[in-house]
Amino acid sequence: MNKTVQELAALLGGTVIGNGEAVIGDVKSLEEAGKDDITFAVDPYTEYLPKVHAGAVIVDKEVPAGDNTLVIVENPRLAFSQLLVLFHPRQSITPGIHPTAIVDETAVIGDDVSIMPYAVIGKNVEIGKGSVIYPYVFLGDHVKIGEGSVLYPGAVIHEHCVLGKNAVIRAHAVIGGEGFGFATEKGKHTRIPQIGNVILGDDVEIGACTCLDNATLGATQVGRGTKIDNLVHLGHNVEIGEDCFIIAQSGIAGSTKAGNHVIFAGQTGCTGHVTIGDNAVFAGKSGIIGNIKGNQTYAGFPARPHMEWSRTQVFLKHLPEMAKTIKDLQKKIAKLEQKLETTVRGTGLCTPL
């Protein structure tokens, strides 16, 4: 596919500064882009543009760019993603049910659905139109899949779970596995049956090998537009709001409730029964042990406001020197106390008890 810079700018709603007639044949990274490619740059990487020799560069403002043609848009990352889809469209999937797939006769399959080899579709399952079920996917009884969803190989959706429209479930994710609940008496653990389900809103994405446990009662819920990375665990009855990010290796324990637009960076851990406000952001490896107010950035263990954590980190690296200083001061104080005591005794003065 070939497009002129001006054609691409029109598609993106952008403005061209430079040669709008240059022909673009591909999308490349800033380091790889050549004269036939388009790339993008945001601060601080725009300072390298004079050394780049691309056909065009997507930016959010006019900057020194050497001989590069600029396409100015409001959101360069979003524009770049649109061009990736344009120049590298996903593989076309042919609708139909492969003969090796096991589909219960009570399942309701929408129009233009593709069910690939060795998928297993249980009783009373509903699959919305245009969905793609890759090989070895398991859909338990009474599962509902919204239209336009894609379930990659080995994904498991347990009984009664509900996926909204345009869900993306990556390979080997498990939705609705039994929650971790036990009653302990006299040192013996007895499992508490988890009879709830998991409900995902529209446009939710779940990463590879991520596990969302079903609820004890009711539902574990993930709100519309939330994106969950690989290797994440949500415990039973967790509720995640809309448009959140949960990054790899994070774990959120049971019955925690997070608001909208919350970001959990990688390896964040959260204890159970916690409430988190809208727009809270947690730096990587944060440890959440109590309720958290929204509209702030947090870091550390236990998680605390980022500026407070930063000040603490400044002192931490000086702890060895501070400890030595304290020991030296203790020795000096001890000598002064001994000297003072000797002086007092020599004058015959004493301190009444």
Image: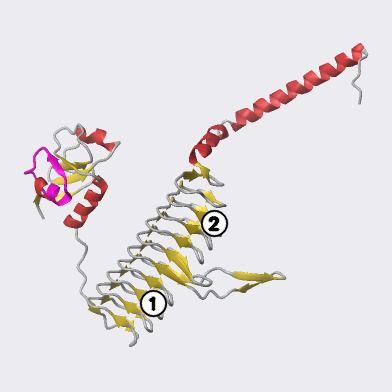
Identify the disc placed on residue 119. none
Name the spot of residue 162 as percent of width and height, x first: 39, 72
Along the viewing direction, whichever of 105 and 230 lies nearer the viewer: 105
Q: Residue furthest bottom?
A: 105
Residue positioned 22% across, 49% down in the render: 79
Q: Is residue 23 above or below residue 69?
A: below
* Amino acid type shown at disc 1: Val
The secondary structure type at the circle numbered 2 is loop
**Residues packed near mark 1 inside 10 Å, few (<14), some (14 to 19) or many (20 plus):** many
Which residue is label 2 attached to? Answer: 274
Is 46 situated above or below 28? Answer: above
Range shown magenta: 8-25
Seen from this angle, which residue lies furthest left?
Answer: 21
Question: Nearer the observer, disc 2 or disc 1?
Answer: 2
Q: Is residue 255 left or right of residue 20?
A: right
Relative placement, left or right, of 136 versus 302 is: left
User: The residue tagged with tag 1: helix, strand or loop?
Assistant: loop
Which residue is at the front of the view, 21 or 147?
A: 147
> Which badge, 2 or 1, comes first in the chain's sequence?
1
Report which residue position mark 1 lands on. 143
Place of residue 57 in the rendered image (x, y in percent of width and height, measured from the top left) = 18, 41
The amino acid pointed to by label 2 is Val
Whether 16 is among the magenta residues is yes
Q: What is the x, y in percent for residue 337?
A: 80, 20
Residue drawn where x is 83% and y is 17% of the image: 340
The answer to which of 82 and 259 lies nearer the viewer is 259
What's the residue at 8%, 44% (across, down)? 22
